[in-house]
Amino acid sequence: MASEIVKDIDEKFCQCCICLEQFKEPKLLPCLHRFCKDCLADMIKPNRGSLPCPVCREECVVPKEGLEGFKTDFYMKNIIEYIQLKTSAEDERTQECYSCSQVFKVSAYCFKCNGFLCEPCHQFHVTSKVTKDHRPHTLALEDIASKQLSLDKLTSLKAAPRCHTHSEKLSELCCQTCGNIPICLACTYGSHKGHDCHEVTTLANEERQKLKEELAELFSMEERIFQMPEKLVSIESEIKATASERIKYLQTKFADKSRIIENELQTLQYKSNSVKIQEEKALKEELDLIQSDMEKEMEKVKLKYHKICEDKKAKSLAKLDISESQHKEKSSNLHKRLTDLDISCKTSTASVMKQQKDSIKKLQEITAHYEGTIERYKNLKAMASSILISMDDWTTVQCIRDISAASAPLMEEMKREYPELLKLNKIQIQAALLSDSVNEYAHITNQESEVSIEEIRNKGWSICDMKTTPEGDIVISGNASATSCYIGLINMKGQLTLHKRMEPSCHWEDPECYFDYLPISNIFTSCDADEIGICNLRFEEHVRKNVSKTIPGWRQTRGVTCVAADIANEQIFVGDFEERDVLVFSYHLDFLRVLRLPDQLTGCHGITVHGNNVVVCDSKGRKAVTMNLNGKIVYEFMKPFNDDNDWKPIKVCADSRGSVYILWCSGYAYSGKHVITQNSQDGATVLTVLPVDDDAFAITTMKTNDKERLLVATLSTGKLFTYNLVVP
């Protein structure tokens, strides 16, 4: 059977993939790929601790002994020796006799002498008492020519290997402790004393049985790994198809929106022309009437009517100037929107192409890795199958351990799942182009103002939370000292008009205050871990409670990081960035229930009520989601940029038109870049990305006199930034 395998071996199987010649002293890597000893030596020189396999690219650790530490591939040496003997028998070429050193046609090969013999020396070899012990190891070449030589018979002719320590002695045992190396009986009393030594045939049978058991599960995965490349090709086609579909969709949207704006421009021009024509017609009629009156009147009133004509002309020109000015302003706005739409389309198209490129690059990496896994599997399967049916015990014990060692990591690679494959085809469009209405949200204009809250900065207080009231008051809160927090009122000039310091009874270190506005000019406050209360806008307390006395099992060490009021349902949500339980209270501070966050979230660092849902910022989990009042996620918000930064959401608010604003941070512990994303009402689209101060920590919106603003406060530097929200 082994001989049949040798016949079917491709000529490249015995060829080194580096020098492209037949193996010379083949050495075996842990991944079971083999190379010439000299070729491997050239590869080890530039690689100190490890080197990648040239075939499967698996990193192989270089043994302490260097090149000599890699095992010699006895299995391949047997195959090469078999091929060489067979070639010599078929060619019938003359060569030097090992015994007489004469060049004759050789007729035999002695495995004791490791050389060819001519016919006279062959007869002497098998009849002389001097070489009596060589007879079992002498092979007549006519047996090879008549195809009576098999790989198994070749193995039986070869002498047992020499002792690993005493090269002058033949091996008698195999030391399993030292990696199945051949030893003599004397070694068991010397360097191998106390080691696990066995008779080679027994050990070979045991190793064959172990390998069969280990390979059973490995072979069961064969169909799966050979199907994976086809699956990867299919996914790549899906990615390209999805990207093509998205780009076509963007182009269609762009064409539709462009057509709408062009129609509006034409309508505006038509209206402007109509106003001009009507005004000119009315003027002419009035002038004709005045002229007629002037002709009827006496000369003394002629000057009076002339003055009336001039007044009418002036008023008409003023109306035309106003109309023309309005026309120019509206036309300019429409052209700007058309330009913004074009930029948005190009940006979105570039984003889709980049996502396609990144997805295909990742897919190619997975494909290359999987092809390497398949090559490792094919190589291990071929080698293991040959070893299992081979009768060469020494080759078996030398190779099976290496096969077993290579099968374990290969099994892990074959079992490995690729969850990222499910995400590669999710190409997202991050642009306002997807909006069905041109005027559905407010635009964030350039920064309107920047003021310094001097008293807050001079006191060294922090700003952790900020809200506004319908009356236009700005309320801020934060930490005041190691044992106290504060809540205060400021105006648009950054002046602190009123404040109150509070010392929580739980003695929380560096306490912070979080709050939200309630109807009838009341404020709900939460001072870190255990205290909640309600006060008016002069910070006069009406109610104050300890949470631990209201909720059994409440830990006073919990840290509250956000508060949101649900005015429609008269409920208050209190969140903790380290807990998934959001506490729900009534306006009278009665505990109602626990809103459990879904498993995808780790805590709540920012929260706001948005219609019948709540928006939650999970800073630790790097996610911002909208969920219903039963704790089910409705949708997840997109991050500001699809880059390598570790963006995490800090705070959230919403404007009167339903747009959601999320403050994101790219660094550790709120350091790094800070940006605010303006998101559509359904959360599917990032409308605007606004870079803000890197110390920004609190955001809110304020609406007064039909004008709405976005306010941004910094954590430690005491600054207040204002941005206009303008509806086109």
Image: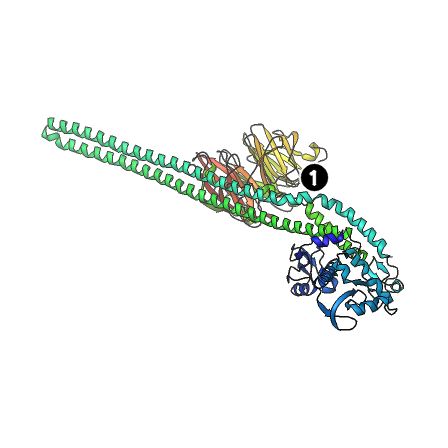
Badge 1 element: loop
Give the residue pinned by disc 1: 556
Tell which of 703 and 376 is nearer to you. Answer: 376
Q: Is residue 89 left or right of residue 434?
A: right
Q: Is residue 110 above or below residue 236?
A: below
Position of residue 576 in the picture relative to residue 458 (left or right): right
Camera-nearest residue between 616 and 206: 206
Residue at 17% of width from left, 33% of height from top?
A: 307
Can you give x and y, in whole percent of width and height, for residue 235 in the image?
A: 58, 42
Q: How many marks?
A: 1
x and y percentages locating residue 215 in the rendered image: 75, 47
What colour scheme does the image use? rainbow
Which residue lies most toward the bottom here?
Answer: 101
Residue 684 place in picture, x, y as percent: 52, 37
Q: In the rendered image, is residue 686 in sight?
A: no
* 229 relative to 497 in the view: left or right: right
Q: Residue 126: x, y in percent?
A: 84, 66
Identity of the amino acid at label 1? Gln
Question: Which image quadrant: the C terminus?
Answer: top left
Residue extending farthest right = 189
Residue 156 visible (yes or no): yes
Left or right: 484 with respect to 719? right
Q: Which residue sits at x=47%, y=44%?
A: 349
Crowding at dot 1, Cα within 10 Å, few <14 / some 14-19 / many 20+, comes out as: some
- Which of the two residues, 616 or 268, is positioned nearer the viewer here? 268
